[in-house]
Every structure is written in structure tokens, then in C-alpha cells.
Image (spheres, coloured by chain):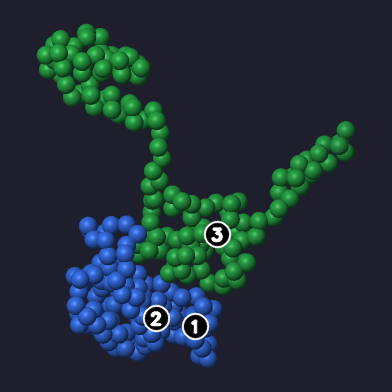
Amino acid sequence: MRAYELMIILEAELEESIVQGVINRTTEMVAARGGSVPTTDKWGRRRFAYEIDHKTEGFYVVLEIVTEASDLDDVDRFLRLADETIRHKIIRLPDKEAARRGLVGGEATPATAG
Amino acid sequence: MAKPTPKRGKNKDNARRSKKKISLLLTERVEYVDYKDVNLLRRFMSDRAKIKARRVTGNNAQQQSQIAMAIKNAREMALLPYVNRVTTQRGGRGERGERGGRADGPPPRPTAPPPTTGDVEEGTEELQLETTGGEQE
């Protein structure tokens, strides 16, 4: 299992239910592959550092994900196709940092196949 | 002959880098450079939003690499700017711009003084002449 961090930028004017829907969808997709989402952090509206598609604000969500390597392809594709998302980014957390956050604790089984 | 030259070199070297820069990452005990930590990353950027050089920040190669990656990730997610325009006031530029605009502006005026191509100073004089001429008409 590996720890990832997923940041999603959604449109700022979306309703709460739609935002929650996107989050639920991604967590379901992760769970379907046997992974888990320990934390979902909704930053809320935030100003962009520069304009994206003539928008100045976005709704930021950060998820911490623990799953097998390369099981996030579905999530990536879903987010790329979803109209509500402006941008998203998946980052593999280094093992040290993941352990510090308590995401990948005792089960220290470095996957050599990945 | 061989002895004095290296001494000189060493002295120069010591004088120049007598103060060894210590990276912020060390003083603040940052273990993992997070691209979400905007306030930390901003301190490694210039006011024009460029990434500061290693010789400025005192990072070692690994730290600089981590910082650069984090800043670039943060830029992609619009947390940090790619460029930051700093407004600088320059006297010469503004005058030149004005003159150019004027020269394009009032072309249908045959009574204007004939030689209009000149330096900046001449241009201002001509402009004054033109305006006075317009008033007379």
C-alpha cells in the first residue's frame, strides 16, 4: 500500500451537494480497489494565484489516499472527464512523510513489483 | 613564487564567503517540503515570483530540488504565481509612449511643421507647436 495525496480544484459556484458528490465518487472508486481515504480536507473557496479560464476562484479539496500502486488511474480519468473539476493533481507521498502522518504505519511491506 | 599565490586566493575566498548561509529549511526544521505550504515556498521566491538561486538561499542540491518541485506543483494548482508583475516607474518610457501616440493621432493637419522625425526633445517642441496651431484655427 502506498500513500497519495489528491488535490482537486472544483468550480467555485458549485453547490455543496455536487462537491460532496465528486468527493464521494472518488472515495468509492478508491474503495472499490481496496484502498481507503483516511482524510478529506475541504479547504473551501480560495483565490487563484492567476486566472484559469477567466475564473479567479476555485473550491479546493485535498484527499489523503492509501491504496495499491497505480490504482488511481480510474480516479484520474474520472476527474479529468468531470466537468466540475478545473484541475486536479495526484502526488505520491514519500514513505517517510506518509509514516509521519500515520497513513502507512505498521504494515511496512515495500512493494517491489510497483 | 608558488606559496604566495594560493595564500592570496584563500584569503579572498574566506573574505567573500565568510558568512556561510544556512538554509531556511534547516533553521525551521522542515522535513518534507509540501507544495501546499505556500508561505514557506514564497520565501524561496523573488518578488517577481522567480525561484531564488541556491547561492541566495543556501540550500544544498537536494533541498533546492525539493523546493523547485514543490513550487512548480504549487504553480500548477494556482497556489503560487508563475509571474508577478512589478510596476516600475521609468521617466523615459512614458514620454516616448506619449510621443508615439501623438504622432499617430493627429495626421490630418497640413499646417503642422514639416520635419516631424526627430529626437525626444524635438518631439516635445513639435507637439507644443501643433497644439498652438490647432488653437489658432
What is the chain identity of the residue bearing mark 1?
Answer: A
Question: Mark 1 highlights which residue?
Answer: A101
Q: Nearer the viewer, residue A76 or B27?
A: B27
Residue B64 is labelled as 3
Q: Which chain is depicted green?
A: B
Residue lying at 54% horizontally and 78% vertically, measured from the top left: A96
- Crowding at dot 3, Cα within 10 Å, few <14 / some 14-19 / many 20+, comes out as many
Circle 2/circle 1 CB separation < 8 Å = yes
Shown colour of chain A: blue
Find residue B84 and report its horizontal and vertical position in percent.
39, 50
- Residue A75 drawn above or below residue A49: below
Dots 1 and 3 on the same chain = no
* Tag 2 secondary structure: strand
Indicate whether A84 appears above or below B14: below
Query: Is B78 on the left-hand or right-hand side of B101?
Result: right
In the rendered image, which residue does mark 2 sit on?
Answer: A64
Instruction: Give the amino acid type for the residue marked by disc 3 in the picture.
Output: Gln
Q: Quadrant of the C terminus of chain B?
A: top left
State the image quarter where residue B128 is shown: top left
